[in-house]
Image: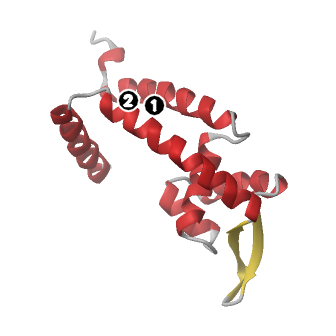
Amino acid sequence: MENFTTFWCFRLAALTRKVSRAYNSLCARHGVTASQSFVLFDLLDHEGSSVKDIAARIQLDSPAVTGLIDRLHKEGLLQRAEDPNDRRSLQIFLTPKGRALAEAMLPMGREFHLAMKQSLSPDLAERFEQALAALESAY
């Protein structure tokens, strides 16, 4: 029988957990989780977005993003406002505290990204990027 630990789905999941633990530990120093940081970063570029739009961009489902937003709101990092074009929808905005945190954390996220890339040779990093793009488009 083939060893399941050689399956790409297993190896990718295991690697994802390792990378997530490392990035989460950096985020914890700022009092947020990795997923919460992605919401904050997204709002730096897309202020006033709906939960649905944030969810699509950070590739989580809307209920998960709603939970992240609830916790960030409780910490005073986000505010919600009724969408003037659709009363059923909310727009999400960074508070000044949330914007300051996102801007302070963004360099850390970039450094983590660069450290991962630099752990590979430039040629391998380029091929890995291509492989990620191919897998993303396949699934």
Location of residue 124 (image quadrant):
top left
Q: Are marks 1 and 2 in contact (CB under 8 Å)?
A: yes
Judged from the image, the secondary structure of the residue bearing numbered disc 1 is: helix
User: What crowding class fits label 1: few (fewer than 14 Cα within 10 Å), some (14-19), or many (20 or more)?
Assistant: few
* Left or right: 134 as drawn, with respect to 48: left
Q: Does residue 25 appear in this view?
A: yes
User: Residue drawn at (64%, 56%), measured in percent from left and top?
Assistant: 65
Location of residue 118 (image quadrant):
top left
Kind of residue indicated by mark 1: Thr
Relative to 110, is 62 above or below? Answer: below
* Left or right: 2 as drawn, with respect to 100: left
> What residue sits right under mark 2 in the picture?
12
* Left or right: 60 as drawn, with respect to 72: left
Judged from the image, the secondary structure of the residue bearing numbered disc 2 is: helix
Q: Does residue 64 appear in this view?
A: no
State the separation of the CA atoms marked 1 and 2.
Answer: 6 Å
Q: Residue furthest left?
A: 123
Query: x%, y% of residue 23?
Result: 54, 33
Relative to 106, is 31 above or below? Answer: above
Query: x%, y% of residue 18?
Result: 49, 24
> What residue sits right under mark 1 in the picture?
16
Query: x%, y% of residue 120?
Result: 26, 28
Query: x%, y% of residue 30?
Result: 70, 40
Relative to 109, is 38 above or below? Answer: below
